[in-house]
Image: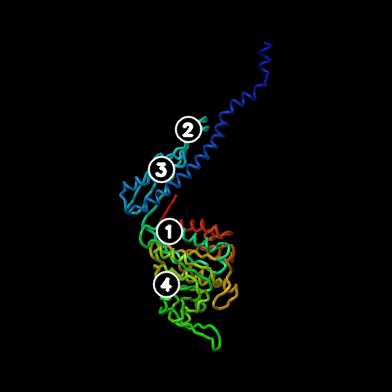
Amino acid sequence: MSLLSRFRKDTSGNVAIMFGFLAVPMIGIAGACVDYARASSARSTLNAAVDSAALMVARDATKLTDAQLKVRAESLIRANLAGNSDAKLGTYTVAINRTARTVNVTATTAVETSLTKVIGVDTIPVSSTAQSAWGTNTVELALVLDNTGSMASSDKLTELKKASLDLLKIMKDASTATDQIRISIVPFATQVRLPTTYKDAPWLRYDLTKGTGSNKKTITKATWEGCISDRDKPYDVSDAGAVTGQNATLYPADFCAQSTLTPIRPLTSDWTALTSTINAMTPVGNTNVAIGAAWGTASLTPIAPLPEAAPANTPRLTKYMILLTDGDNTQNRFSDNQSTMDARTEAACSNAKVAGIRIFSIRVIDGNRNLLRGCASETGMYYEVSNASQLAPIFQQIAREISQIRLTM
């Protein structure tokens, strides 16, 4: 009886016993954290694989049969999952609706658990779905790019060219039909420039002068090198619809303040020509953001001076502008101060938005942050970089956002 009594009162082994009871769930909880992280990684990989499959199948929908598209989708998913051992393809479906021109891709995987098995969980199911459409949306995009002298510093123009060429490639690859995506390029400094083949355009005027006294000269068709200055106010910030034939509404041909400024490339899907324009850009002159924004709008408006654009109410058409600068406004035709020039730029951006154009604005190291943020259509469409090398990922992000035919998670 004495032995039994001592055994009953002895509690020195309770901790070990309690630890034994708790060990299994503690191991299971710890394992769950590890396995959840693995499942999250598998989910990200699966999402990317399904997104890619949906977009690529949509691109090929007009060329391949439904059976071929399903085989292609499976192949794409498996290829994109190959680098993640936890993301092994389970079930998948590819639903193609040729009436609605949509493709829906759904795929699942099951991540086999490790320590979580001790609490009875053998697998963590993961699934993803994406929808893409083809031949439904069209895009018109104006690249309004600062080509001023300050862009020569800090590799800004070099990095801008790289980023712009990346954007062109993404847009070209995303285009599934002729002219589905068209782009214009508007290099700007104090002025903008056009090919001299426009010299007889009825919306041009030839009355600006330079010099004084006996040295005073008036611009002529023969001496015009393609440069154009701001229109008379208030038309300097309006879209092309204000051209009426009256002198104040016409675009003033001018002597070139920057004779090496790259000419505007009107809307086109000629990717070789667009690439050539980007590669030809050189840094020269002072900054006049308003004239860049005004001509970006003009390139997206279906009347003079650049009539290549489709009407704003064209079904399934979206118009965009990327407005990039690295400095404050410094010079325009009117010798305005910076405050007045900023107000003109703000008005030009507002008129572009009224015309149905969605604006991305980018500040490269320097420039009026508040002005450019206000030019953007939304807060998330404004970017600024502290190093020119950051332009490439930003342009890639914008390009993918614009060029996706349609994608939903």
Give me the disc on residue 171.
Answer: 1
Give me the disc on residue 122.
Answer: 2
Residue 272 in the image: x percent, y percent?
Answer: 40, 63
Label 4 sits on residue: 306
Which is more toward the observer, 152 or 188?
152
Q: Which of marks 2 and 3 is nearer the N terminus?
A: 3
Q: Earlier in the sequence, mark 3 or mark 4?
A: 3
Could you tell me which residue is drawn at 49 percent across and 79 percent down?
254
For label 2, the SS is loop
Could you tell me which residue is drawn at 44 percent across and 43 percent down?
81
Instruction: Tell me which amino acid carries mark 3.
Output: Arg
Q: Is residue 76 above or below residue 185?
A: above
The answer for how far apart the CA atoms under marks 4 and 1 are is 22 Å
* Image-quadrant location for residue 133: bottom left
Q: Callout 2: 10 Å neighbours few (<14), some, many (20+)?
A: some
The answer for how far apart the CA atoms under marks 3 and 1 are is 26 Å
Q: Which of marks 3 and 1 is nearer the N terminus?
A: 3
Q: In this view, does 407 lie above or below 239?
A: above
Determine if residue 346 is in view: no
Q: Which of marks 4 and 2 is nearer the N terminus?
A: 2
The answer to whether 37 appears left or right of 196 in the picture is right
Residue 181 in the image: x percent, y percent?
Answer: 40, 61
Instruction: Tell me which amino acid carries mark 4.
Output: Leu
Colouring convention used in this rendered image of the protein:
rainbow
Label 3 sits on residue: 78
| Closer to the eye: label 4 or 2 | 4
Instruction: Tell me which amino acid carries mark 1.
Output: Met
